[in-house]
Amino acid sequence: MKMITIDTCGLTLYSPLIPAIKAIYCTPKGETIEIVMDNALAFHDLKTFLSEQKIGFREIYQGERMRIQFSIH
């Protein structure tokens, strides 16, 4: 199974949620996505969104970087 990784670290032009949400809606069903963030507020918002959509996820913390992995069903 292939994992698509979206790294939003260091984005300053717009919210890191924009490429994250785009990835969710553009990724084919059955694929796994990993989104890497360094913005704690956006990471929390993404987790809330996924929970509301009933999408299970895995959180990984590595210093300032936060990763969230989930599959599109």
Image (cartoon, grey):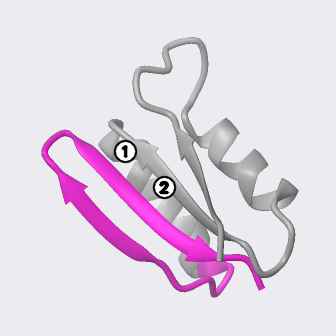
Q: Horizontally, is 12 left or right of 64 in the view?
A: right
Residue for point 27% across, 43% down = 65
Q: Residue furthest left?
A: 63
Q: Residues within 10 Å of mark 2 (few under 14, many from 20)?
A: few
Q: Residue furthest top?
A: 13
> What segment is highlighted magenta in the picture?
52-73
The amino acid marked with disc number 1 is Leu
Q: Amino acid at mark 2?
A: Asp
How many residues crowd around disc 1 within 10 Å: few (fewer than 14), some, or many (20 or more)?
Answer: few
Q: Position of residue 38 (x, y in %)?
A: 33, 36
Q: Residue at x 68, y 79 (%)?
A: 53
Q: Which residue is mark 1?
A: 41
Q: Is residue 16 magenta?
A: no
Image spot of residue 16 (x, y percent): 54, 34
Above/below status of 10 relative to 52: above
* CB atoms of marks 1 and 2 within 8 Å: yes
Q: Quadrant of the C terminus?
A: bottom right
Q: Which mark is residue 45?
A: 2
Q: Which mark is residue 20?
A: none
Q: Indicate the position of residue 37 as horizontal and vertical percent values.
A: 40, 42
Label 2 secondary element: helix
Nearest the camera: 49 or 69?
Answer: 69
Q: Nearer the viewer, residue 1 or 47?
A: 1
In the image, 2 versus 8, the foreground residue is 2
Asked whether, in this view, residue 21 is left or right of residue 35, the answer is: right
Q: Residue at x 34, y 70 (%)?
A: 59
Q: Residue at x 58, y 12 (%)?
A: 13
Q: Is residue 54 magenta?
A: yes
